[in-house]
Image (tube, rainbow, N blue to C red):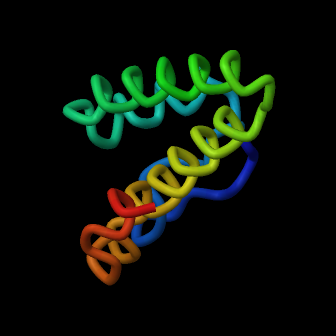
Amino acid sequence: MSSQAVHSDGPLMPMPDLTLPALRSAVAALASAKLPELVEEMRQAFDRAGQDGSTAPVRMFYRRWAIFVAIERDPARAARLPGAAIAC
């Protein structure tokens, strides 16, 4: 995880590195009910990447879940942006 400071009125955790284990761990800590969705989207992204011969689906998968974590790790931000993490 990055070395971003965590304050009692700020983020619940530092922003994780953009790796599958780090994002999966963050999603598990912030919204464990979303883990099946993360796993299914990961499977689909890697399948599409293999079919298309492109890394774009994998990059979009990481981007979508990084945005989800960035929003959900900060309760004030999540309250201001209800549903935004799901729509990204």
Residue 30's image quarter? top left
Q: Position of residue 74 (x, y in %)?
A: 42, 64
Is 65 displayed left or right of 33 in the figure?
Answer: right
Is 31 displayed left or right of 69 in the figure?
Answer: left
Is 7 displayed left or right of 15 in the figure?
Answer: left
Which one is in front, 11 or 64?
64
> Where does the N terminus fall, quadrant-wise?
top right
Residue at the limit of the structure toward the left, as seen here: 33
Which one is in front, 5 or 81?
81
Residue 44 seen by the camera: yes
Residue at the limit of the structure toward the bottom, as seen here: 80
Residue 6's image quarter? bottom right
Compared to 28, does 43 lie above or below?
A: above
Q: Residue at x 65, y 37 (%)?
A: 57
Q: Position of residue 19 (x, y in %)?
A: 69, 28
Q: Residue at x 53, y 50 (%)?
A: 64
Q: Residue at x 73, y 43 (%)?
A: 2
Q: Residue at x 48, y 18 (%)?
A: 43
Q: Position of residue 49 (x, y in %)?
A: 68, 25
Residue 21 seen by the camera: no
How many numbered tags mark residues here? Answer: 0
Compared to 79, does 53 lie above or below?
A: above
